[in-house]
Amino acid sequence: MALNVDSGGKEELKTQFITREGTYRLMTLSEYSRPNRVGYTNIQGSTSVRVSFVTLPDPNGNGDRICFNIGRELYVFIYKGVKKAADLTKPVDKKMYKGTNPTCHDFNTTNMTSDSVSLLVGFSTGQVQLIDPIKKELSKLYNEERMIDKTKVTCIRWVPGSTNLFLVSHSSGQLYLYNEELPCGTSPPNYQPFKQGDSFAIHTCKTKSTRNPLYRWVIGNEGVSINEFAFSPCGSYLAIVSQDGFLRVFHYNTMELVGSARSYFGGFLCVCWSPDCKYIVVGGEDDLVTVWSFVEKRVVARGQGHHSWVSVVAFDSYTSTFAIGKHQEWNENTSPSENKVDTCYRLGSVGQDTQLCLWDITDDILRQKPCSKTRNTVVSGSVSPSSNSNKTSQNTCANKEKDGLEAISSFTHRLGIGFEKKDNIGHKRSLSKGTTLQLTNNSSDDPMRLIGTNSCPRFDECPIMEPLVCKKIAHERLTALVFREDCFVAACQDGYVYTWARPGKMVSDGDFVTFS
Amino acid sequence: MQQDAHEFLNFLINHINEIILSERPQKSKNGDGDAGNSTPEPTWVHEIFQGILTSETRCLNCETMSSKDEDFFDLQVDIDQNTSITHCLRCFSSMETLCGDNKFKCDHCSSYQEAQKCMRVKKLPMILALHLKRFKYMEQYNRHIKVSHRVVFPLELRLFNTSDDAVNPDRMYNLVAVVIHCGSGPNRGHYISIVKSHDFWLLFDDDMVDKIDQSAIDDFYGLTSDIQKSSETGYILFYQSRDTTETNINEAKVNGK
C-alpha cells in the first residue's frame, strides 16, 4: 500500500506559460523517448538524460537530428520539432550497451554531410566511442581498456572547428585531448609535465610515436570531479566547472588560466557562455545561477529561484539582445561603443526541483558597481597571517571577528582587489589576471579566503535576480535544456524529452500527421 | 516499537550536559533564591552544538517589532519533494503570518493581534545538526507516516537564513555525518549512519563498518516517487563549521611546538 503523503509528485504540471514575448506551449505530440515504453525499469540513480542536436545540410530543411541517452541506451531520431509529431517507430540509430551507460554525446558540425555525421559518446565506465549514426560503418573506441582513465566521462566536446580533435572530462578531475585518428596505445600512458599553473597542471605523453591522449589537464585537487566544460562561442576560451565549487576559465591554445570564480557553497554542476562571449553563467549545489563577467573577472549577479540544485544553464540567443551579433533591433547607425542597444540576455535553467526558470539579465543588473557594504560582522575563519593565529584560535567571537576583519582587509589590500579599485578600467585586465592566479593558489582548498572577494562576493554585496518565469514542468528532475529557433527542449531523468513551442510557433494539433 | 533517532540525540545531548553539570564543583549553595534564575556556565556540549535562533515578530496593528532569542541544539526543518536542504532551511525562515487562533500577544497593544513572524539564525553553532521532519502526522490516516521525499544535501553548506545581526553569518560548513532511516514507517525499520573520518566515508550498520564511496551518499537523498514502500533516507544531517576545524588544527600545531 502506497500512501499519498501530500501533493508532492501529484502536483499538476504546467503545459503552457506566458512571458512578455507570448505563450510557450508544450507540444504533447513531440515527446521523444524510448520507442517501446513498456518494460520500464528502475530509473532511480541512473545516469542523467542528455540531449544533443545537429542540423545536417538538407535542401528540404529536414536535417535536424536529435540524440539522447536513457539508461544503457542511446537513440538518434529525426527531429521534427514543432512541425510534426515525433515518429518513435523509426530511430535513425539505436544502441544498447552492456555493463556501462552512455553519459554524454556530441555531434561534429565541422565535417558533417547530408548522409554522414560523427557522434562522440562518453560512458560511465570511462570509455569513449565514435560512431556515425547515419552511415553506421564507423565505430571506434578510445580508452577501451580503461588505461587512460577508469572514471565516468562527465562531458565530451569536439574542439571548435576541428574534424578530429575532441576533449573528454572525467569525474577523476582530469580532462584529455584526443585525436580521433590516433591509437590509445596498449599500455598506460607515461606523462611528462608540459605546463603548470595554480590549481592546474597539463601533461603530454612521453612516447615518441604519437598516441592518445595528446594532453592531460589536471584541474584542481586530485579526484575532484570536473562536472562540465564549455568552449566560448568564439572558440578561444574554455570554461570548466568542478565539484570543488570552482569555475576556471582558460585560454584554450595558450593553456593559461585567465579567471576563476567560487560557488557560494558546494560544487558547480553546469556552465554556459553568453552568445557574445562576455559572460559565463554557472549553476550548482547552492541552488543559484551565478553570472560571471569575463571582461571584469568578477561575479556580477546571482539568480535565486530554484528549490534544489541547478543541473543545466543555457542562454537563449534567439531572445537575447546585445550590442554585438545578430539582433532584430540593432541599428547600423549606432556605434558599438555608444552601446545604445538595451542589453538583455535571456537565460534558462533547469534543476533537480523539476522546475524551469527563465531569467532576464539586463543592463541595470550588469552595470551595478560592486559594493562593499559596511558590515560589523565578518568571517571568523583562519585567514589571518601566522602571527595572529594564536589569537584567532581563542574562543571568543569578538576576538575572531576583529582578527578576521583585519586579516581580510590586509589580504585584499595586498592583492589589490579592493572594490574601489575596480573603476580603473585600463588597469583592470592585467590586474585581474594576476589576482586570479594568486587567489586560486592560496585558496584551492580554503573557500573561506574567497568570501567577500570578486570570486565569491557576500550575498548582500551582489545583485540578486528573480526569475521571470519559474514553472514545474516535470515529475522527475530535469537534466537537459536546449534553446532552438522555434522551441526549447527539456529532458527529464525518467527518459522523456519535451518540446516547448515558442510563442506563435505551434502548429495546431489538427495539422499533425498521426502515428502510423 | 522503535525509538526515534532525533529524540535520542536530544536525550543524549541533554543527559551529557547534566552529567557534566552535576560533576562540577558546587560553588555556593547558600544563594538559594538566585540559583533558580541564573543559568549555569555553558559546557562543551553547548560550545559544540548550541546556536541561537532569533524570532522577529512585527505586530500588524502597531507595527512594533519585537524579537526573542532562543538556544537550539538542532534545527527541525519541514521538507518538500524534490528540494534541497538549502531550500528547506529557507522555508524554515520564511515569513509566517500569525492570525486566527494563533494570534500574537502584543505587549505594546496589550492584546492579541495579527502579526508576522520570522525565525532566523543569530549565532551559528560549531556543529549544525539538521533534523529532517520525515515523520509527519497525517490526520486522514490518524497516524505518523514516513515522508521519503528526495531532499538533496551538499557536502558543503552555508546558511542563507541568518539574521541581520548574526555573529558569524559567513560560516562554511562541511557535511561530516548523516543518520539514515531505513524502512517504511516511523515504528519500524533500521537506523544506520555514515561518518566522514580522515577523508573517508564510513558506513556504520550495527556491528558492521564499511568504507563507502563518496558518490554513494546520493543513495540517501530520498525518492522522487511515492510509490515505493521503503526507503533509505537522510534523517539527521551533521555539518561541521570549517573555521573551527582549521582553527583547531592551527591551535594543535601551535601547541605542539
Image (tube, rainbow, N blue to C red):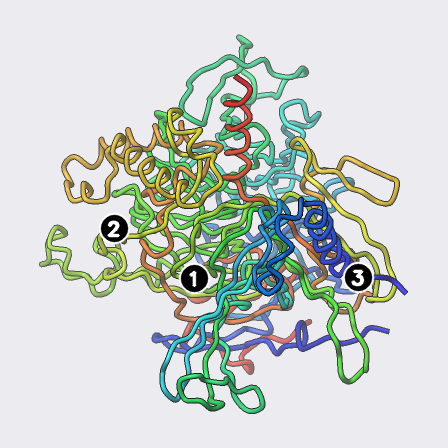
Q: Badge 1, how many Cα within 10 Å: few under 14, some, many 20+?
A: many
Q: Residue at x 37, y 25 (%)?
A: A387
Q: CA distance from mark 2 to mark 3?
A: 48 Å
Q: Is residue A171 left or right of residue B110?
A: right
Question: In the displayed image of the protein, which residue is found farthest to the top?
Answer: A208
Q: Say what amino acid the circle numbered 2 marks.
A: Pro
Q: Residue at x 73, y 40 (%)?
A: A100
In the depicted structure, whether residue A258 falls above or below residue A343: above
Q: Say what amino acid the circle numbered 3 marks.
A: Asp
Q: Which residue is mark 1?
A: B163
Task: Give the SS element for disc 3.
Answer: loop
Task: Give the SS element for disc 2.
Answer: loop
Give the quarter of the image for residue A426.
top left
Contact between marks 2 and 3 (CB within 8 A): the answer is no
Q: Which residue is mark 2?
A: A370
Q: Chain of mark 3?
A: B
Q: CA distance from mark 1 to mark 2?
A: 23 Å
Q: Say what amino acid the circle numbered 1 marks.
A: Ser
Between A203 and A1, the one nearer to me in the picture = A1
Upstream in sequence: badge 1 or badge 3: 3
In the depicted structure, whether residue A63 falls above or below residue B255: below
Q: Badge 3, how many Cα within 10 Å: few under 14, some, many 20+?
A: few
Where in the figure is residue A355, as x and y percent of width and height? Answer: 54, 66
Between A101 and B45, the one nearer to me in the picture = B45
Q: Badge 2, how many Cα within 10 Å: few under 14, some, many 20+?
A: many
Q: Residue at x 25, y 50 (%)?
A: A370
Where in the figure is residue B37, as x and y percent of width and height? Answer: 58, 64
Does label 3 lie on the same chain as label 2? no
Where in the figure is residue A433, as x and y percent of width and height? Answer: 28, 31
Q: Which residue is mark 3?
A: B4
Q: Which mark is residue B65?
A: none
